[in-house]
Image (cartoon, rainbow, N blue to C red):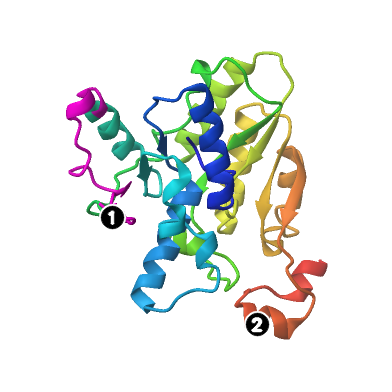
Amino acid sequence: LSTTMIIDHTSLRAVARQIRHHIPDALLIAGGVYLWKSYYMYRKQQDSRAKAENTHRTLFQSNSLDTGIDIFVIAPHGRAALFQVLQEAERGSRADFTHIPNLALPSDAETFSFTPVQEEEVDYNTDYTRWDLLDDLPKRIPFRTSIGCPFRCRFCDFCHLYPRLFLRSKDSLLEELQLLKRRMGKEAFTLYLTDDNAFIRSQRVHDVCQTIMAAGIQGWSGFLRASSVTSSNVDLLRQSGLVVAIIGVESGDSGQLERMNKVQRLEDVKH
């Protein structure tokens, strides 16, 4: 069960109960962004030894043991842990998941037990979506060119959840885009860049735009900072098919931007 669109343990419980209604005896495994964020918050609370005001809304407290989930994968990506869980599950009643890293397991002691934390090895240049194996695709295709963001805005948790910045190579981007183009054939679609920040530096603007153009993609949208758009690259952005630029302005007050640690000038936003 992916928790990308889950916002609290109440909604997670509701989804799990729906699954249980149709498949009562299933081994229910959950992972994804909401769980990773919940574990980050839980660990932060434990380190500070201070009870957060919204503790009742976060996972891994005693009041969230009744979600109906058997195994929680708590990692930024979780693929390696999931594979190990599936292999161990083949042992049936003899399965023991306590030796698998990056898991949270509901226990009989009205608490969660956590297995050792282990850093994941993920190669984003090769571990991209196999579009050719999917039967149905939306008209707005999610596509990720990078992970993380070098900025440290105080209101944002991206930099904490994914502290390392990784920019995929142009070859990797082109391989996935060509695979997607072959899969879609003559069907019209728009590419949606899901990056926290699509353009980290000026050279990245050229790399991404030129790769999109080389793949023959007709239209795309994505998150970018106002300072990414300059007089020297605005024509390239247009040529590459940018149709919607989602820009985080946040505030029109310089003092507020400074308090947010939003390193952005109002002149750039206006321009």
Q: Is residue 108 found inside the magenta-colored segment of the image?
A: yes
Q: Is residue 113 above or below residue 12?
A: below
x, y percent for residue 125:
41, 38
Where residue 181 sits, quadrant-wise, is top right
x, y percent for residue 97:
22, 39
Q: Is residue 141 left or right of residue 130?
A: right
Viewer-nearest of discs 2 and 1:
1
Check disc 1 and report its element: helix, strand or loop: loop
Kindly identify the amino acid type of the residue bearing the numbered disc 2.
Glu
Label 2 or label 1, whichever comes before in sequence order = 1
Check disc 2 and report its element: helix, strand or loop: helix
Which residue is more in the foreground, 42 or 77? 42
x, y percent for residue 86:
29, 28
Residue at the spot 57% in from the left edge and 40% down from the top edge:
14
* Numbered marks: total: 2
Q: Which residue is mark 2?
A: 258
Q: Is residue 213 above or below residue 159?
A: above
Q: Is residue 267 found inside the magenta-colored segment of the image?
A: no
Residue at the spot 46% in from the left edge and 64% down from the top edge:
160
Q: Which residue is mark 1?
A: 109
Provide the residue span drawn in magenta: 89-114
Which residue is more in the foreground, 170 or 59? 59
Residue at the spot 47% in from the left edge and 24% down from the top edge:
130
Residue, far bottom: 255
Is residue 162 in sight in this rendering?
no
